[in-house]
Amino acid sequence: MLRSILLKLSASNGFANWVTSNGKTRSMAQRFVPGETLDQAIAAARQCNNAGMLVSLDYLGENVSTTADAQRARDAYLEIFERIAKEKLNANVSCKLTHLGMDLSVEFCEGLVLSVVERAASYDNFLRADMEGSIYTQRTVELVKRVRARNPAIGTVIQSYLYRSESDVKDLLAYGCRVRLCKGAYKESAEVAYPKKADVDANYVRLMQLLLSSGFYHGIATHDPQMIAATIRHAAAQKISKDDFEFQMLYGVRTDLQRRLVKDGYRVRIYIPYGLDWFPYFMRRLAERPANVMFFLRNLLR
Ligand SMILES: Cc1cc2nc3c(=O)[nH]c(=O)nc-3n(C[C@H](O)[C@H](O)[C@H](O)COP(=O)(O)OP(=O)(O)OC[C@H]3O[C@@H](n4cnc5c(N)ncnc54)[C@H](O)[C@@H]3O)c2cc1C
C-alpha cells in the first residue's frame, strides 16, 4: 500500500516541486544520488573504482516531452563516454529510453540511442538501456535488438516481477544480448506482474540460472542476500567463474554487502545516478523499503 502511494506520488509534479525545492529532502536524496553534476558523479565513480568496484553512470531523466530535451540528453550521454575515457574510469553508462525520446517516436529515439552506442563502442565501452514501466517493455526489447544488430555495445534490463520476462530472456539470449536482471521498481498490476514477493524472488532465481548458464556476460542486480546466495551457489555448481558475471548494486544501498562481495573476489558494479532530475529515482528508492520512508519522515519533522 505504502509502495503504491509512493510510486503514484513519483509522477506528481506538485509533490516533485515541493520535494526538490526543500533543503532537507535534497540532502536526504544525496544518500542515493551523489550529486547533480557530472563532476560529482565522476568523483563518486573514482571512489568506487578505488574500492575495487566497477561503475555504471546514469544521467537522471525520463519521459522527456520535446525532441530538444531528448537531444540534450543524447549530448550529455556522448559527453559521459568522453569523460570516462579521459578520466580512465572503469565505468559504463545506463540510460532510460524515455529520456532519449521513446514517448515521442520510437524511430527518433532509436536514432539517438544508435549514436550513443556508436560513441560507446568507439571507446570500447557499453550502454545499458534501463527497463522502465511495463508499457515500455516490448518497445525497449525490440529497439535494443535492432540497435544491437548494428552495434553490439548495448544491453538491457529484465525485471523478474513480470510474467513475460522468461520469454524476453530467451529472446534476448538468442541475440547474444547482455542482460541486467533486477526485480523491478515500478507500480504494476497483477495482470502483468507477480503481486507476491515470493513469486518475484522464485522467478528471479529461475532467470538468474538461465542467464548465468548462457555463456554470455550478465549483471545480477540485487541487494537481496538470498538472491546473491542463490547466484553464488549456482555459479559454483555449474563451475561458472567469478569473472564471467557481475553483481550490481545501487549507490548508497547495502555498502557493507558491496564491500564483502569484492573482498570475496566477485565483480561488483555500482549504479551511480546524477543530475537535477532525481525526484522519481529518489521516490522509487523510498518505495523499495519502508525503513527509508520512516527515515525520510523523521528528518522532515525534525
Ligand atoms: C544496479 C541496479 C540497476 C537497476 N535497474 C533497474 C531497472 O532498469 N529497472 C527497474 O525496474 N529496476 C531497476 N533496479 C531496481 C530493482 O528493480 C529493485 O527495485 C531494487 O534493486 C530492490 O530490489 P532488491 O533486489 O534489492 O531486493 P529487495 O527484496 O527489494 O531488497 C532486499 C534488501 O536490499 C536492501 N534494499 C533494497 N532496496 C533498498 C533501498 N532502496 N534502500 C535501502 N535498502 C534497500 C534492503 O536491505 C532489503 O531488505 C535496479 C537495481 C539495481 C541494483
Image (tube, rainbow, N blue to C red):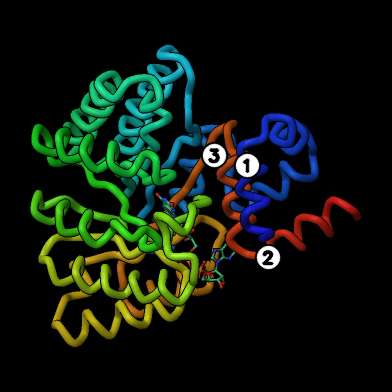
Q: Is residue 54 above or below residue 204?
A: above
Quote the CA–CA distance across marks 2 and 1: 16 Å
Query: Where, by quadrant of the figure, is residue 112 drawn?
Result: top left
At mark 3, the secondary structure is: helix
Determine contact: label 2, label 1, CB under 8 Å. no
Q: Amino acid at mark 3?
A: Gln
Image quadrant where residue 268 sits: bottom left
Please give the residue where the numbered disc 3 appears in the rendered image.
40
Mark 2 crowdedness (10 Å alpha carbons): few <14, some 14-19, many ≥20: few
**Which residue is depicted at the point 55% across and 63% down?**
253
Q: How many marks?
A: 3
Outermost residue, right direction? 302
Marks 1 and 3, the one that precedes in the sequence: 1
| Position in image of residue 85 (x %, y %) | 29, 37
**Hey, which residue is sitting farthest front in the picture?**
191
Rendering coords of residue 63 (x, y %): 48, 29
Dot placed on the residue nearer the N-terminal end, 2 or 1? 1
Residue 250: x, y in percent?
48, 57
| Crowd band around label 3 with a 10 angstrom C-alpha radius: few (<14), some (14–19), many (20+) | some
Quadrant location, the N terminus: bottom right
Mark 2 or mark 3, which is nearer the start of the sequence? Answer: 3
- CA gap between label 3 and label 2 equals 28 Å
Question: What amino acid type should be assigned to the residue bearing mark 1?
Answer: Ser
Q: Identify the residue under disc 2.
A: 290
Looking at the picture, tell me which residue is in the foreground, 37 or 192: 192
Give the mark toward the camera: 3 or 2: 2
Where is residue 44 shown, x and y percent of the image? Answer: 50, 48
Mark on residue 263? none
Name the residue that disc number 1 marks.
Answer: 10
- Of 58 and 259, which appears nearest the observer? 58
- Image point 37% across, 58% down: which residue? 162
